[in-house]
Image (cartoon, rainbow, N blue to C red):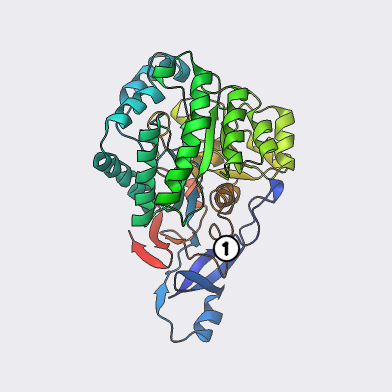
């Protein structure tokens, strides 16, 4: 089809945007875009493309803004149950790490997820995936990590593969067996780390060769944090994963600076995520690396924590900054990248243009997909949004609602 009469056709064409370059939108006023067989064929002005392709099926954008679908580069999409009671505990003064040490936090979700059967886990996760898509997320990275044993980790991965097959949300899976130390390994952190490296990672690769041989291997991630995995344990997991051919990610510096960002850069990780308490030296290192920084503003917001990713410092250092929701049951049950954009403008002090670029082309880069999604360019997958407003800046200006009017995924139209 030929989509025409967009008030702003926001292309975000070109490479992922580093440092102070962030926010280059490539807006075409009164723009149009030609799609065929799920791919973008041509982009230009409405006048030119209507004249050039007079017989194409048309979709009138009706003077609304058109932009790439959001790419949510960090989610914990698949879990069972909820942690509403822990939210109340935090309001009563308990910290996230105190709740976790008392057997709550990730451990409580692990218990619920291990107990869930496949159908109930799929049903709960599908509902979240549909909510994400309705809010304009057309591709999402999604982690396991609420099993902390091989059987449940593979069950979570199976749900993610099934949801990706069903669509319309495209799912990029990540293995997060190193999310926390399970209760049965309390005070035996090194033994669990060894289990992840020596048994889980090889078993996952063999399982993947049978279940998803046509897909690239999933990412492997580690929660490098006090109370989770220390720097040496993180190195062991990431090094073992790299040796098996897995691409890498790492949760770093959410609460304390342990040196995880330096390690991730050394090992060539695709991204480091959270990056709140990162040292000045590591910020400079990230600016010189090809490792993206994924900021998760919904998480400190959910924790009532005043500390956010130091975005201005990262951009000054020339880093590649991306945005994501961190959708999870404990700190950020939020399916909306629109809300992440709104928070990024208020607490990371990004401009609306910077936040939008971070939520599309840069977040696609953070999950290794910027060659195919994240911008509107000929030859890329036709994943785009038609907003219900004329100006993209409303995505940051307004919050709490949904400004997506239509979602187009791989060339197929999904009206709201």
Question: Number of callouts in the render?
Answer: 1
- Residue nearer the viewer, 256 or 196: 196
Regarding residue 186, the answer to whether it shows in the image is yes
Q: Position of residue 219 (x, y in %)?
A: 52, 43
Tell me where residue 264 sits by quadrant. top right
- Residue nearer the viewer, 69 or 343: 69
Vertical side of 54 occupied by 111: above or below = above
Pick the quarter of the image with the C terminus. bottom left
> Is residue 132 rendered to the left or right of residue 274?
left
Q: Position of residue 116 (x, y in %)?
A: 27, 34
Tell me where residue 254 sits by quadrant. top right
Residue located beneath label 1 in the image: 11
Pick the quarter of the image with the N terminus. bottom left
Q: Position of residue 92 (x, y in %)?
A: 38, 14
Q: Residue at x 42, y 62 (%)?
A: 409
Q: Position of residue 3 (x, y in %)?
A: 45, 72
- Residue nearer the viewer, 342 or 363: 363
- Residue nearer the viewer, 174 or 58: 174
Q: Residue at x 54, y 65 (%)?
A: 380
Indicate the secondary structure of the residue bearing disc 1.
Answer: loop
The crowd level at tag 1 (other Cα within 10 Å; few <14, some 14-19, many 20+) is: many
Regarding residue 274, the answer to whether it shows in the image is no
């Amino acid at each position: 089809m030929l989509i025409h009469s967009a008030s702003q056709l926001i292309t975000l064409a070109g490479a992922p945007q580093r440092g102070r370059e962030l926010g280059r939108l490539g807006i075409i006023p009164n723009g149009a875009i030609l799609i065929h067989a799920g791919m973008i064929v041509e982009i230009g002005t409405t006048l030119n493309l209507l004249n050039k392709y007079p017989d194409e099926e048309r979709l009138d954008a009706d003077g609304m803004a058109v932009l790439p679908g959001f790419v949510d580069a960090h989610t914990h999409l698949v879990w069972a149950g909820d942690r509403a009671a822990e939210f109340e505990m935090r309001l009563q003064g308990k910290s996230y790490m105190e709740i976790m040490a008392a057997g709550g936090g990730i451990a409580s979700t692990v218990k619920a997820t291990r107990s869930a059967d496949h159908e109930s886990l799929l049903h709960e996760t599908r509902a979240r995936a549909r909510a994400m898509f309705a809010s304009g997320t057309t591709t999402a990275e999604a982690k396991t990590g609420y099993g902390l044993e091989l059987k449940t980790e593979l069950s979570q991965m199976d749900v993610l593969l099934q949801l990706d097959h069903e669509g319309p949300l495209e799912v990029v899976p990540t293995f997060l067996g190193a999310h926390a130390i399970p209760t049965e390994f309390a005070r035996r952190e090194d033994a669990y780390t060894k289990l992840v490296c020596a048994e889980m990672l090889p078993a996952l690769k063999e399982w993947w060769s049978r279940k998803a041989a046509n897909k690239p291997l999933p990412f492997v991630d580690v929660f490098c944090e006090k109370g989770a995995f220390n720097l040496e344990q993180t190195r062991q997991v990431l090094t073992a994963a790299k040796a098996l051919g897995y691409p890498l990610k790492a949760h770093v510096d959410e609460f304390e600076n342990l040196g995880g960002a330096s390690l991730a850069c050394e090992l060539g990780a695709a991204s480091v995520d959270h990056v709140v308490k990162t040292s000045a030296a590591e910020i400079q290192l990230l600016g010189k690396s090809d490792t993206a920084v994924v900021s998760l503003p919904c998480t400190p917001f959910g924790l009532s924590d005043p500390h956010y990713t130091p975005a201005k410092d990262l951009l000054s250092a020339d880093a590649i900054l991306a945005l994501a929701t961190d959708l999870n049951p404990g700190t950020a049950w939020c399916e909306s990248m629109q809300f992440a954009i709104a928070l990024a403008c208020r607490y990371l002090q990004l401009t609306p243009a910077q936040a939008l670029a971070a939520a599309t082309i840069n977040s696609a880069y953070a999950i290794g997909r910027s060659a195919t999604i994240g911008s509107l360019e000929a030859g890329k997958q036709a994943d785009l949004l038609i907003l219900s407003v004329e100006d993209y800046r409303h995505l940051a200006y307004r919050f709490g609602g949904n400004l997506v009017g239509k979602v187009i995924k791989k060339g197929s139209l999904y009206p709201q």
